Image (cartoon, rainbow, N blue to C red):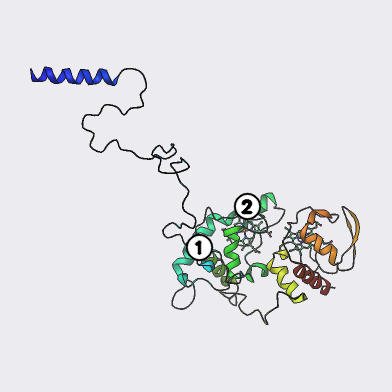
Amino acid sequence: MRNLLWSGVVCLVGLVGCRGWESEKPPVHLIPNMDTQEKVKAYRKDTTGLFADGRSMQAPVEGTVALGQLNDDDAYFKGTDEKGEFVIKLPAAIKGDDGAPKAEVIARGQQRFKIYCTPCHGAAGDGNGTVNTTKGLLVPPPSMFSDRVKELPNGKVYAAMAVGVNNGNMASYAAQIPVDDRWAIVAYVRDLERSKDGNQAWEPGGDSGPAIDPNVASADLGKKLYKGKGCNACHSVDGTKIVGPSFKGIWGKSEKTSAGDVTVDLAYVTESIRTPMAKVVDGYPPAMPPAVVTDVEAQSIAMFIETLK
Ligand code: HEC
Ligand code: HEC
């Protein structure tokens, strides 16, 4: 008798639940506990009236920082100091008691370098990676043993991975390589250079001579910018053709360009830097990335080029 009664109830409940049309009401639920309660669901309209704009997913309050992601140490996360210049020093966290990077950090860097950098910069770090030797990149990856890379402050080697190089000539590897690993790779690059050149410093660029006033145009400032802004990737100062014309001996010269003959002077140099495509030198590819420079900086670069008679 009890069983019959129960099965009657079950049938009834079953029937009520299967009427075949939709209902806004919650289904019959005998022992609800806390199963159905008013709540907002992701990607659904907020029906509780809790939020004025009716969205259930709210943007985080401005200035919200996820736990452990404050990243306020620019030297570590951007490779720059308080003046915005690239740091010379390696982070203390990767160094051992002797001031040199720890062996396990270098080993990790080597392993990551092999995965991510070898295709272009080569397993030996000499710039002869498969991508470069088979496809012949328009702007070639430099050898890690070139003066260009050996003289880079550590922060700039880090930045090559964090933000890329020269408007994407080398893409950023920020998505693939986490911050700790980027510094491990920097340490490995220095270790690699030191294996060939015992005099190579772990932290090059520290002794850069007298400070140069960045607000007064000078050939010294121009020389610094020539390296700092990566012009040395494509322009030599000794007559060698890299990707662009060498700066040696061009000052005052007449150049044939896509917009006719021009004389290399301050106006032309400034325009070449800011809008390289305006006048493309005959015989060269339109491969120069525009750079942002102040008037003082453009003037300084022109003064530097003028010294390269
Ligand atoms: C797909 C090819 C490619 C890969 C992979 C690659 N690079 Fe590069 N890298 C380049 C090219 C090309 C340049 C030169 C860009 C230029 O001169 O404008 C360059 C330049 C550099 C420079 C010089 C930066 C400067 O400011 O002068 C450094 C340092 C560097 N790469 C480090 C790395 C490291 C470390 C890795 C591995 C995480 C890596 N690259 C992976 C192509 C690559
Ligand atoms: C990725 C390679 C690349 C980089 C980096 C680069 N240039 Fe160039 N540059 C070129 C090429 C290629 C040309 C020749 C074609 C043209 O005129 O655009 C050129 C032309 C020039 C010229 C004209 C030279 C002449 O003989 O008439 C000047 C001046 C110049 N660049 C300045 C700079 C300065 C300053 C920087 C650094 C802020 C720089 N370039 C960075 C590739 C580069």
Look at the picture and state if 223 lies above or below 168.
Answer: below
Mark number displayed over residue 170: none
What residue did someone put label 1 on?
Answer: 109
Q: Is residue 245 visible?
A: no
Q: Cβ(mark 2) to ligand 1 < 8 Å?
A: no
Q: Looking at the picture, how far across and down is residue 165, in whole percent? A: 65, 59
Q: Residue at x 21, y 32 (%)?
A: 31
| The N terminus, quarter of image | top left
Quadrant for ligand 2? bottom right
Disc on the earlier residue, 2 or 1 = 1
Please, what secondary structure does the residue beneath circle 2 have? helix
Please, what secondary structure does the residue beneath circle 1 have? helix
Q: Residue at x 36, y 27 (%)?
A: 24
Residue 73 versus residue 153: which sits nearer the camera?
A: 73
Residue 34 versus residue 159: which sits nearer the camera?
A: 34
In-image side of 46 versus 200 (left or right)? left
Q: Looking at the picture, how far across and down is residue 11, in whole percent? A: 21, 18
Query: Where, by quadrant of the figure, is residue 102 drawn?
Result: bottom left
Mark number displayed over residue 130: 2
| The C terminus, quarter of image | bottom right
Q: Mark 2 against mark 1, which lies toward the viewer?
A: 1
- Tell me which amino acid carries mark 2: Thr
